[in-house]
Image (cartoon, grey):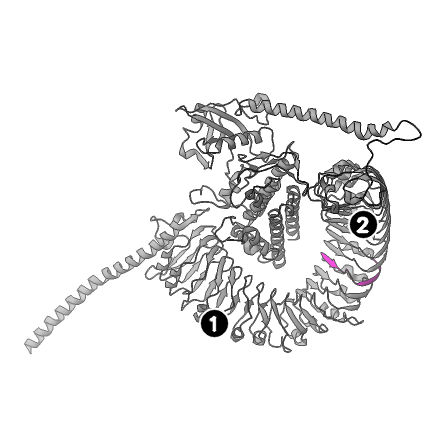
């Protein structure tokens, strides 16, 4: 017994010793394991930081050894073993590529990188993150395909919207059984929607809009019984929509717009859709009738079925949708032409939140009852145009005080335009054309000072044009044509400098002269006053309307000579002066100054003398002079009599006088021009003979000009041309920052690399170009240096004003080595830069004695001062334009171009074909620059191959998908604007709309400027005008939104 006790005691001691040993060694083992795992996570995070190319706000400075990685910005760890479970770097504007080592964060549950500048492909190593539940790469620049192995067992949310992803949507996504939300919109996916997505039984959100998806909608999607949000809009989907899709009772948002889908709506649609909020199927090919049961979907806020082929009556109980804010049935043959066709409007008076009601291009008839005025006072847009509505405008329509758009054109409305229309002071667009309105235009219309478009053409209006229209100082388009208006055109109308779109007063009974204040229409694009009774002479001041593209004065009784000032109409495309009483000769100025003119009509006047045979008149199909019996000469195809060199009169011997006017004066003028050209040539020859590197004067007074600097002075100014002062390098030169000691002024010193072939030519070209041009948006050259360096080698340099904010290139595409300050330009700042550059080119092309072509426009040649004002630099490829005229295009050109100049991607096609060089070469480069500035895409980006270029990339997105291609920084700005107005739904939508509208206008200008054909490009002056209008419109809308708030 004693032995057993002793043996038990021994075993007990050994057991306790073993347990104690285990207790001592176990913490060490666990600690070692945690430390090893922590190290893996830390290294993975540091690898991400290493790949970051830009961190403008220095958010990742905390990612260093001074802090535990779990406290780094955007990092969250679990408390037990300190493993990284979440990485959230959203909206930090950081950029770079995702490293493959991100797959080592094996405990990661959330990866959120929204609203940044990440690029490259999505690493396949993400498939190693088996615990991942939420991945969001929204609004970046990732490209390539979605890795097919991104099938996580725990994944619940995948958001890859607003990137540049391509290829097909992987069918493997259908195996992520726990997936709740899938966002793939605004990419470049092709192919079909995978049927396997129908296996995601718990899926609540599916968004694949704004891609290039084709084929039909899979029937399997109808099995998604928990689906709440489905967005398939703006693709190329076709075929019949599966009926099961319309029967998902959980659906809240359904958007199938802008596809090629067809079919009918089920007769019970709406009965089981109590949660439906948004139903948008516009711009498809749906047919059949609108089911009565739709009124049972009482929660609908947005109902848009516009632009389909639906027919039949609109349900009388449509007003049961009491929460409606937007109702759009436009462009469908819906409704009835009988007297009861509009009775359904009465039920809509129950919709007290209705803001948009579009019933245009339907089949509605009957009279407008007073119930239309009982619609929601929140209504902002009412469109009833293109129907068969009769009667007059209801008297109490003035109750709709918040209307900003009222369209009733192309109906059968009668009676007078009511005076109360002037009480709708928020109106921006008023469209009453194509009706049978009678009487005078009410003077109260001048009270609508917000009006931007007024159209009343094609009625039976009489009386005079109200002088009060002069109060509508925001009016951009005015059309009162095809009426019976009488009297003189008020000068107040011609004084509306805001008119940019058109002024059309044609086919009336207007009389009197055309006043000289027409010159105030400097921004107008189209002026049509044809077929009236205007008299008197054409004012010389009309030549100041330099942006006019269309001018028609035909069918009046204007007389006198055609003014030579018409050569000021530099944008004119069609000029019609026919069927008037003009006399005298055809001005020689009409022969050549027009860049874009397509047709000139001078027929049926009393013109005399010789028809020019050059410029426009070289092409007999581009003009008409029939019905002028005293004209002679011109092309043989005109079949006019030959002009006599000397006209004599049988009654006296003074026939010598016509010779004096037509021959002697031109000879004298020609001789004077010859002397002037000879003098200019002599001055040019003398200047070339002088030292080309003589100091180029600044625009200061001679006493303030800098003396020519020596090599030693520049050596001291740049600290021995220190690499730390190196700003930029180019093909022919290097630019250093320097300080001139005797003035203590910072300058930029451009040192010419004379060993590089072509550098001397570039130096001479820059000196020649900058010698006589001075403009606030052109980089100011201060002086120059020409001599030898310390080794006796030839040395040449130019000294410029220093631009502290560097080049536009560094702002659009910041590199990892240039992060001294946040590199971000907002929409208005970019637009201001674009306007500055366009202003510089207007000066170079139109205001210099000889037009100057830059030939190498790109972001690195645009410098920004401390106020972010743009200055055009690097004139090493510039040339002055010789005054030769291309007779087929009427564009001023150089006689030839030797060798390719410019930079790949920015240079126009004609430059590489050895053809003539014109100012339109710069316009092309400017267009590409605009597209790059607002998309963030270089024209040489790897995504652009063969015929797919930046120009086509943007053109395909216009006008409705501009935010898909916008620079992510601008998309972020638009999102931030919306976010700041999160509690103001209407204001947010307006803010987003005006942002997108402004961006679309800018990109449209860029597309027009970068057209492949030179003849298809805008003139830089026209581009400048439209950019300024876009900026003004955006800022005015912004101001209005702020006031409304």
Q: Mark 2 or mark 1, which is nearer the start of the sequence?
A: 1
Task: Write down the region rendered in magenta.
Answer: 403-416
Residue at mark 1 to residue at mark 2: CA–CA distance: 61 Å
630 vs 431, left or right, is: right
Which of the numbered marks, if any, corresponds to residue 994? Answer: none
* Residue 699 picture location, percent across and down: 59, 27
Q: Is residue 836 above or below residue 337?
A: above
SS for dot 2: loop
**For residue 703, which quarter of the picture?**
top right
Question: Is residue 605 among what the camera can see?
Answer: yes
Question: Is residue 600 among what the camera can see?
Answer: no
Q: Is residue 197 above or below residue 680?
A: below
**For residue 769, which quarter of the picture?**
top right
Marks 1 and 2: CB-CB under 8 Å?
no
| Direction top: furthest residue | 703
Residue 409 among those drawn in magenta: yes
Crowding at dot 2, Cα within 10 Å, few <14 / some 14-19 / many 20+, comes out as many
* Residue 1026 picture location, percent across and down: 66, 46
691 vs 345, left or right, is: left
The N terminus lies in which quarter of the figure? bottom left
* Residue 913 picture location, percent across and down: 56, 44
Q: Which residue is mark 1?
A: 196
Residue 10 among those drawn in magenta: no
Q: Is residue 166 above or below residue 180?
A: above
Q: Which residue is mark 2?
A: 505
Tell me the residue at 68%/41% (across/down): 887
Crowding at dot 1, Cα within 10 Å, few <14 / some 14-19 / many 20+, comes out as some
């Amino acid at each position: 017994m004693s032995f057993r006790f002793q043996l038990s005691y021994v075993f007990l001691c050994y057991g306790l010793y073993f347990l104690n040993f285990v207790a001592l060694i176990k913490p060490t083992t666990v600690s070692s394991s945690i430390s090893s795992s922590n190290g893996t996570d830390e290294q993975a995070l540091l690898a991400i930081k290493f790949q970051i190319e830009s961190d403008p706000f220095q958010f990742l400075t905390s990612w260093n050894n001074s802090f535990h990685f779990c406290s780094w910005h955007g990092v969250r760890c679990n408390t037990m073993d300190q493993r990284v479970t979440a990485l959230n770097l959203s909206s930090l504007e950081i950029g770079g590529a995702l490293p493959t080592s991100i797959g080592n964060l094996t405990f990661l549950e959330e990866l959120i990188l929204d609203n940044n500048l990440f690029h490259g492909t999505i690493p396949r190593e993400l498939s190693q993150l088996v615990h991942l539940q939420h991945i969001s790469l929204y609004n970046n620049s990732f490209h390539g395909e979605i890795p097919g192995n991104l099938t996580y067992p725990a994944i619940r949310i995948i958001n890859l919207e607003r990137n540049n992803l391509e290829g097909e949507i992987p069918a493997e996504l259908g195996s992520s059984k726990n997936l709740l939300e899938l966002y793939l919109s605004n990419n470049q996916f092709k192919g079909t929607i995978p049927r396997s997505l129908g296996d995601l039984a718990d899926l609540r959100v599916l968004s694949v809009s704004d891609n290039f998806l084709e084929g039909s909608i899979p029937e399997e999607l109808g099995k998604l019984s928990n689906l709440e949000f489905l967005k398939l809009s703006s693709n190329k989907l076709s075929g019949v929509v599966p009926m099961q899709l319309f029967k998902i009772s959980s659906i809240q948002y359904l958007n199938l717009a802008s596809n090629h889908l067809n079919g009918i709506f089920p007769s019970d649609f709406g009965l089981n859709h109590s949660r439906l909020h948004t139903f948008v199927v516009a711009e498809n090919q749906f047919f059949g009738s609108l089911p009565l049961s739709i009124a049972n979907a009482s929660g609908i806020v947005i109902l848009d079925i516009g632009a389909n082929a639906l027919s039949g009556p609109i349900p009388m109980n449509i007003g049961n949708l009491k929460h409606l804010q937007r109702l759009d049935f436009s462009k469908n043959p819906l409704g009835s032409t009988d007297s009861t066709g509009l009775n359904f409007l009465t039920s809509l008076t129950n919709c007290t939140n209705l803001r948009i009601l579009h019933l245009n291009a339907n089949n509605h008839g009957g009279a407008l009852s007073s119930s239309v005025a009982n619609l929601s006072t929140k209504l902002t847009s009412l469109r009833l145009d293109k129907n068969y509505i009769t009667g007059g405008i209801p008297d109490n329509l003035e109750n709709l005080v918040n209307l900003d758009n009222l369209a009733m054109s192309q109906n059968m409305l009668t009676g007078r335009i009511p005076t109360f229309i002037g009480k709708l002071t928020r109106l921006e667009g008023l469209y009453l054309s194509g009706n049978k309105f009678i009487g005078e235009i009410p003077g109260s219309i001048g009270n609508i000072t917000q009006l931007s478009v007024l159209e009343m053409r094609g009625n039976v209006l009489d009386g005079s044009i109200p002088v009060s229209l002069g109060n509508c100082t925001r009016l951009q388009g005015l059309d009162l044509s095809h009426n019976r208006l009488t009297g003189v055109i008020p000068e107040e109308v011609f004084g509306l400098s805001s008119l940019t779109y058109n002024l059309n007063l044609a086919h009336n009974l207007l009389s009197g002269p055309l006043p000289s204040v027409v010159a105030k229409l400097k921004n107008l694009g189209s002026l049509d006053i044809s077929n009236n009774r205007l008299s008197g002479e054409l004012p010389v001041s009309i030549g100041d309307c330099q942006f006019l593209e269309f001018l028609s004065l035909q069918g009046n009784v204007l007389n006198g000579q055609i003014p030579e000032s018409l050569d000021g109409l530099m944008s004119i495309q069609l000029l019609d002066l026919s069927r008037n009483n003009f006399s005298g000769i055809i001005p020689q100025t009409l022969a050549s100054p027009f860049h874009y003119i397509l047709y000139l009509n001078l027929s049926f006047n009393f013109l005399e003398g010789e028809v020019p045979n050059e410029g426009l008149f070289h092409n007999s199909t581009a003009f008409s002079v029939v019905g002028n019996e005293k004209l002679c000469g011109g092309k043989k195809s005109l079949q006019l009599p030959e002009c006599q060199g000397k006209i004599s009169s049988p009654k006296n011997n003074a026939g010598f006088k016509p010779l004096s006017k037509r021959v002697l004066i031109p000879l004298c003028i020609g001789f004077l021009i010859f002397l002037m050209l000879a003098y200019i040539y002599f001055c040019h020859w003398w200047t070339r003979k002088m030292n080309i590197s003589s100091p180029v004067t600044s625009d200061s007074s001679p006493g303030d000009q800098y003396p020519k600097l020596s090599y030693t002075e520049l050596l001291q100014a740049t600290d021995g041309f220190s690499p730390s002062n190196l700003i930029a390098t180019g093909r022919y030169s290097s630019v250093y920052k320097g300080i001139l000691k005797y003035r203590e002024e910072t300058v930029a010193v451009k040192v010419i690399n004379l060993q590089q072939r072509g550098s001397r030519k570039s130096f001479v070209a820059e000196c020649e170009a900058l010698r006589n041009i001075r403009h606030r948006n052109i980089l100011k050259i201060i002086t120059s240096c020409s001599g030898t360096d310390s080794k006796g080698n030839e040395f040449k340099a130019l000294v410029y004003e220093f631009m502290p904010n560097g080049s536009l290139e560094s702002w659009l595409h910041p590199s990892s080595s240039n992060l001294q300050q946040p590199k971000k330009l907002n929409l208005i700042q970019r637009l201001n830069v674009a306007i500055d550059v366009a202003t510089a080119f207007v000066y170079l092309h139109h205001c210099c004695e000889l037009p100057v072509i830059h030939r190498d426009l790109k972001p690195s040649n645009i410098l920004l001062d401390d106020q972010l004002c743009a200055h055009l630099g690097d004139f090493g490829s510039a040339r002055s334009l010789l005054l030769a005229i291309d007779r087929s295009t009427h564009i001023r050109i150089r006689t030839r171009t030797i060798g390719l100049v410019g930079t790949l991607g920015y240079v126009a096609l004609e430059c590489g074909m050895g053809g003539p060089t014109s100012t339109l070469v710069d316009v092309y480069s400017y267009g590409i620059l605009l597209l790059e500035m607002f998309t963030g895409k270089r024209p040489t980006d790897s995504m652009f191959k063969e015929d797919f270029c930046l120009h086509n990339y943007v053109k395909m997105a216009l006008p409705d998908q501009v935010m898909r291609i916008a620079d992510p920084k601008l998309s972020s700005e638009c999102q931030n604007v919306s976010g700041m107005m999160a509690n103001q739904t209407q204001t947010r939508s307006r803010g987003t709309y005006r942002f997108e509208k402004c961006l679309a206008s800018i990109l449209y200008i860029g597309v027009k400027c970068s057209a492949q054909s030179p003849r298809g490009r805008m003139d830089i002056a026209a581009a400048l005008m439209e950019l300024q209008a876009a900026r003004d419109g955006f800022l005015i809308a912004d101001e209005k939104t702020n006031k409304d708030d």
